[in-house]
Image (tube, helix red, strand yellow):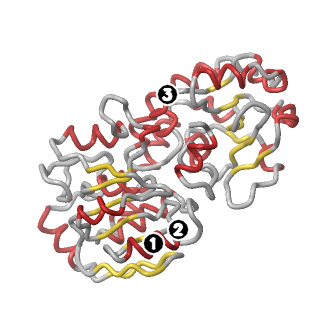
Amino acid sequence: MPFRFPRALTLSAFATVLALSACGSGTQGEPAAGAAPKAQDQAPEQAQNQAGAAFPVTIDSALGKATITAQPKRIVTLGQGSAETAIALGTVPVGIESYAWGSDPKTGYLPWIHEAVTKAGGTLPKQFDGGEDIDVETIVELAPDVILAPWSGITKEQYAVLSGIAPTVAYPDLPWSTNWDQQIEIIAKALGRPADGPKLIEQTRARLADAAATRPAYKDVSFSYVYTTGPGTLGVFKPEEQRVEMLTSLGLRVDPVVETFKETEGTDSALIGLENARKLAGSDLIFTFYTDAKTRKEIEAQKLYAAIPAVGRGGVVASDDNPFVTASSIINPLTVPWVIDRYLPLIDKAVATVEK
């Protein structure tokens, strides 16, 4: 996906390579209502008492410890997925890192965030620049109680600055390496709702499982999810990568050949080169994305790429709709419900090309 590809690249770095997830309160940072799926179903007073009992809490990360002394009311998020998880857990952040590439041009927000907040009449978070050049001044003005960045690429130097503003929760291991369910658990702990993390994870998995149950034929279909960084290049995402996990959660099977490719260090992907496109001959379907129509035309015009059997017979699931590409690339409590009903018809069309 354009925002975490591979793990080691920052948001702005990947954008360069390519030439280039609801709230009831009317004030930012206060408990939300109606986020989907919603983890907590206790009475407000009961939930508040449980959250209060969870503090102080200290969360370790690869960059340092964050000690949160009381339930945060003003949350700032960096990277991907933290804003959506906070909303689903009941709190709308006061500020979030902007992601123009995947946002709706009309609203300027990722559509699932905009929909979740506005549907319940909440106040949209302020957006600010992130990546390599974090807008620290705006973060200071937002006066956060906590900064959540467990799935991000913040550096040691950035962490030092951010932790001077508020307790900052970074990634537990490597940049952009936190699993989606691990991220939910971390954020639930930081917000004083550790018991709600597993509930939210289960609800997200159940939404995918429910969709899979409507498509039993998918279990017999293999696929590879490929990417390019321009003409002449080719890579594949490994099974543990989130966009691939979303598809396997829907019942599709990763082509076994993918496991034979050596993973590029620090990523969930393998650069195999266009000359190895023929090795994907056993994939019933090819999944990919394009940054724009011009790039798509260039990629599909390559003879080696066009010779992949699935490509030749139209068994490709691809989109150059940036919000869709973004939502189908990350698993979190808001992206999954938003993207599934948009995804299934595209997959169905490609599956119909498979001869069994």
Q: Secondary structure at mark 1?
A: helix
Residues at circles 1 and 2 in contact by the CB criterion of under 8 Å: yes
Residue of label 3? 321
Query: Measuring 14% from the left and 61% from the top, which residue is drawn there?
Result: 43
Residue 40 rendering spot, x and y as whole percentages: 26, 59
Left or right of 304 in this view: 254? left
Q: Amino acid at mark 1?
A: Tyr
Where is residue 78 drawn, in percent x and y? 41, 58
Q: Estimate how packed mark 2 is, as few (under 14), some (14 to 19) or many (20 or more) residues with alpha carbons within 10 Å.
A: some
**Gap in Å between the C-alphas at discs 3 and 1?**
33 Å
**Image point 32% across, 57% down: which residue?**
86
Task: Give the image location of residue 167, x and y in percent.
Answer: 34, 75
Mark 2 — residue? 155
Q: Amino acid at mark 3?
A: Asp
Rendered-image quadrant of the N terminus: top right
Separation of residues labelled 2 and 3 (CA atoms): 30 Å
Residue 226: tell me if it is visible. Answer: no
Q: Residues within 10 Å of mark 3 (few under 14, many from 20)?
A: some
Judging by the rendered image, the residue that carries numbered circle 1 is 159
Is label 2 or label 3 in front? 2
Residue 39 falls in image quadrant: bottom left
Residue drawn at 27 percent across, 42 percent down: 116
Q: Is residue 218 at least partly visible in the picture?
A: yes
